[in-house]
């Protein structure tokens, strides 16, 4: 894309509609060739984005782009709703349907799904709507409450943790939406559970999912981001989960964590070898054990279908910690 079309794409967030390309002088055959070669990608019917940029996007980024494409193609007043509104605030998504875009539209009288667009009945109050990047969308409180009614508990916790962490919502208003405004709506009970369970201290999707897993397998509720210090007060470790009654640390091992560790050590991901970071992580774990605590680890693939295995690891760690304690 170049010239006027590039300017239009920049204003719209990185995409153009077919009619805009044709208005800027592109011929039908030229558009077809660009799509066939992969220079452009049809991210939605009749809406295009540069192929190189699209291939670099995360699923959440692609979804946010889809939301903008949908909104720009709808007539009348449109308010982006549910997790679609959260995506436009860069909230990470997991476990939600990325093929559907949720909106409130002026004049809608029935809830329906049409061409991947979920039309919700009614219109949000003015206090629950704001304009961001030229798009009207529900404020975080209403968006999270609505999402909590329509997604799974685990997916809702991922959203809830991230909203608390990144957006600093009005917690009183958040509870009010679920407790009063939408009390009798379908899914309100689940939304209330999600909001009550959400914790801003969970730093990644993996940590949020791990919190749900820990509760699901019946372990005591952990503290998050516990600091371990040396005798002189220096912090040598910050752990994901800490179960005080059993002196046991829980650690979710994700690529994000090690990438962050690389950057924190050097300021440049290219300057430090991953092997060095893994060795440092082993020494860190040894220090935690030397302080009298046990450590249990798990990876992303173990968050599904491995509850018994992970519970077994914790039970073994609890037993080891109990044997360390002085008699009496």
Image (tube, helix red, strand yellow):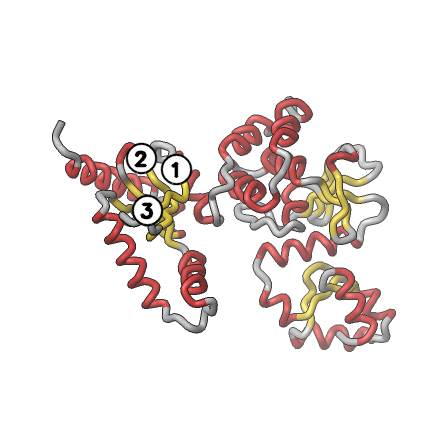
- Which residue occupies the extreme left position in the image? 327
Quadrant (top left, top right, bottom left, bottom right) of the N terminus: bottom right
In this picture, is 46 found above or below 327? below
- Contact flag, marks 2 and 1 (Cβ < 8 Å): yes
Q: Residue at x 42, y 73 (%)?
A: 271
Residue 228, labelled with which disc? 3
- Frontmost residue, 89 versus 107: 89
Q: Which residue is label 1 attached to?
A: 223
Where's residue 272, x and y in %? Answer: 39, 70
- Contact flag, marks 3 and 1 (Cβ < 8 Å): no
Where's residue 39, x and y in %? Answer: 67, 74
Q: Which residue is label 2 attached to?
A: 244
Which mark is first along the chain, 1 or 2?
1
In this picture, is 20 found above or below 92? below
- Give the number of the mark in front: 3 or 1: 3
- Which residue occupies the extreme front position in the image? 232
Q: In this view, does 110 lie to the left or right of 264?
A: right
Q: Residue 128, located in which quarter of the rendered image?
A: top right
Which mark is first along the chain, 3 or 2?
3
- Contact flag, marks 2 and 3 (Cβ < 8 Å): no
């Amino acid at each position: 894309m170049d010239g006027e079309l590039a300017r239009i794409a920049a204003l719209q967030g990185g995409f153009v509609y077919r009619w805009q390309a044709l208005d800027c002088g592109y011929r039908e055959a030229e558009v077809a060739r660009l799509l066939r070669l992969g220079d452009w990608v049809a991210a939605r019917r009749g809406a295009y984005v540069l192929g190189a940029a699209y291939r670099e996007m995360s699923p959440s980024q692609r979804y946010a782009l889809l939301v903008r494409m949908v909104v720009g193609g709808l007539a009348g007043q449109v308010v982006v709703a549910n997790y679609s509104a959260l995506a436009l605030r860069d909230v990470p998504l997991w476990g939600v349907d990325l093929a559907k875009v949720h909106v409130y539209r002026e004049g809608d009288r029935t809830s329906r799904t049409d061409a991947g667009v979920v039309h919700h009945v009614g219109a949000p109050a003015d206090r629950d709507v704001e304009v961001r990047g030229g798009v009207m969308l529900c404020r975080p409180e209403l968006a999270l409450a609505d999402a909590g009614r329509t997604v799974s508990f685990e997916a809702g916790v991922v959203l809830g943790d991230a909203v608390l962490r990144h957006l600093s919502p009005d917690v009183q208003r958040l509870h009010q939406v679920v407790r009063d405004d939408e009390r009798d709506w379908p899914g309100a009970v689940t939304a209330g559970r999600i909001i009550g369970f959400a914790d801003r201290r969970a730093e990644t999707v993996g940590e949020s999912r791990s919190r749900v897993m820990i509760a699901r397998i019946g372990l005591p509720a952990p503290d998050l981001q516990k600091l371990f210090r040396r005798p002189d007060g220096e912090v040598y470790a910050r752990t994901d989960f800490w179960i005080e009654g059993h002196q046991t640390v829980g650690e979710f091992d994700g690529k994000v964590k090690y990438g962050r560790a690389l950057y924190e050590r050097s300021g440049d991901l290219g300057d430090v070898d991953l092997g060095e970071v893994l060795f440092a992580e082993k020494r860190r774990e040894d220090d935690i054990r030397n302080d009298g605590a046990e450590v249990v680890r798990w990876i992303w693939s173990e968050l599904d279908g491995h509850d018994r295995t992970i519970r077994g690891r914790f039970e073994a760690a609890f037993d080891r910690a109990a044997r360390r304690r002085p008699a009496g």
